[in-house]
Amino acid sequence: MKIAVCVKQVPDTEARLRVAGDGRWVDEENLPFVINESDEYALEEALQIAERTVGEVVVLSIGPARVREALRKCLALGAHRAMHLSDEAFAGGDAMATGRALAAAIAREGFDLVLTGSQSDDVGSGSTGSIVAGHLGWPHAWLVMGVELEEGNSSAKVTREMESGMNEVLRIQLPAVLEIQAGLNHPRYASLKGIMQAKKKEMAEVSAADLGLDGAAIGASGATVEILSVAFPESGEGARIIEGDASSAAQELVDRLQKEARVL
């Protein structure tokens, strides 16, 4: 089985963030970057499936030169090769533009399965995987918490996480795109042997021209969402505790929501 895993390099959530000078994103100077958390679970699931089916895992990512570090880590963990969508034309893209580019790269090869994380830790749109599936014309599932191959690996029994502790079980024909939820498995650590082997594994550089993509359809030009500004949350006055019985407390709460918060 041939599996593609889409990964994203994001700012370390434990790092101290600063807003960039233009106010539209975080300042990336000296900022540590890591592999997006749910993407790590997607990679682990792909590696486990490949081990059971004697398959191949190919990791893909879009971004500047620093993305090679994330891809190299994926190779050290066991991925067989990597594709770096490296082109200035890809810069500034949203989920729509990024999904379009990833789908074009995936369509060049005969993949049986595409795994992504459920959402990114920075923007968190949770839609890139579904956009990839849409462009490929493949079925897909989001918030996947279980994958079981069936029928000679031609379909998969998929468990989705729902609200209130409920799960939904689907049977999806392959090829398909599955968006993996964090917690599905236990991501492995890279061994010294894996780190050394990663240096010899293929990491292909792919441009927009290689994919036959029009510059107007990718990157900032192909984005449908524009980030105008980012800012840290303003500090509030703290919590207010309303005393009294339920009836009087409820009335006071409604009064405050109407007169102070002005949300009713």
Image (tube, rainbow, N blue to C red):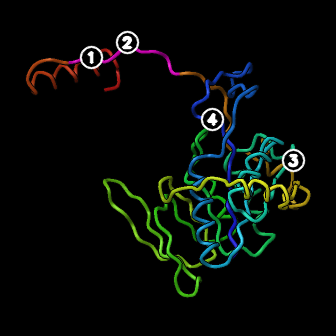
The amino acid type found where label 3 is placed reads: Asp
- The crowd level at tag 4 (other Cα within 10 Å; few <14, some 14-19, many 20+) is some
- Residue 262 location (% of width, % of height): 34, 20
Callout in the foreground (3, 4): 4
Q: Which SS does the magenta portion mostly show?
A: loop
If you read the primary sequence from the N terminus, does the residue marked by circle 1 or circle 3 appear first? 3
Specify the quadrant of the image occupied by residue 3.
bottom right
Above/below status of 167 relative to 138: above
The amino acid type found where label 1 is placed reads: Arg
Above/below status of 239 relative to 1: above
User: In this picture, which residue range is highlighted in magenta?
Assistant: 233-241
- Residue 99 location (% of width, % of height): 70, 55
For marks 2 and 3, give the CA distance: 46 Å
Callout in the foreground (4, 2): 4
The amino acid type found where label 2 is placed reads: Glu
Tag 2 residue: 237
Tag 3 residue: 87
The amino acid type found where label 4 is placed reads: Asp
Residue at the far front in the pictured view: 192
Above/below status of 248 relative to 227: above
The one of 38 and 106 positioned closer to us in this rendering = 38
Are circles 2 and 3 on residues that touch, CB within 8 Å? no
Element type at marker 1? loop
